[in-house]
Image: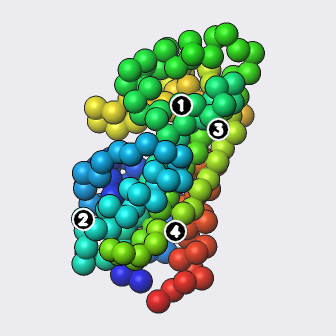
Amino acid sequence: MQAINFITGNENKLIEVRAILGDTVTVNSKAVDVPEIQGTSEEIAIEKCRRAADEVQVGGPVLTEDTALEFHALKGLPGPYIKWFLQALGLDGLNKMLDPYEDRSAEAVCTFAFSHGPGEQPILFQGRTLGKIVAARGPTKFAVDCIGWDPIFEYEGQTYAEMDKTEKNKISHRFKALMKLKEWLAENKE
């Protein structure tokens, strides 16, 4: 397979994707402004991938990612809208949303969508990691000028932000989704 165009402007996500996929496929980064739509994680991922494929056109297959953080006490919210909740409320505000509840469990969800190109139906690969929401611990920057929710998502005693990147890449929601993609790519070599 030719190289995949991973639609992201986030250098850290690109590094993680390349590290997890290894030499399975060449992953290039392409920044494409794709409008955010409303819907489920799956609906958002499919539409984002369709629009990216149309934008890239003859540039080859595209891969998009949609990340969600689902609070069980809030029946899955903020879910795919975590980016907007985080921008509006910050890490402390996200924590305070759960103060009225005993249940602080949450799932980190990563949904990758792959398309061979314009007009092709995107294929989804989803990974989930169960954890809980805690007071922020560890570095608060995921990327330059980008505050992520890694410091408040705890998995087996450590927040994502406290974990060594290599260790995180072995258990994260992104890792689980990319392993499904990697297996699919191996089975569908062209």
Mark 4 Cα-neighbour bin, 10 Å: few <14, some 14–19, many ≥20: some
Q: Give whichever of discs 4 and 3 has the lower sequence position.
A: 3
Against 1, residue 64 (above or below) is above
Earlier along the polypeptide chain: callout 2 or callout 3?
Answer: 2
Residue topped by disc 4: 123
Q: Which residue is mark 3?
A: 107
In percent of the image, x 57 and y 80: which residue is there?
186
Label count reads 4
Q: For the point 25% across and 56% down, which residue is it?
A: 32
Instruction: Residue 168 in the image: state x and y as whole percent.
Output: 57, 45
**Circle 1 — which element?**
strand
Can you give x and y, in whole percent of width and height, for residue 42 in the image?
53, 53
Which residue in the structure is indicated by mark 2?
55
Residue 98 in view in this figure = yes
Query: How far, Cα to Cα, is label 4 from label 1?
Result: 24 Å
Give SS at disc 3: strand
Q: Amino acid at mark 4?
A: Ile
Residue that appears at 36% across and 75% down: 119
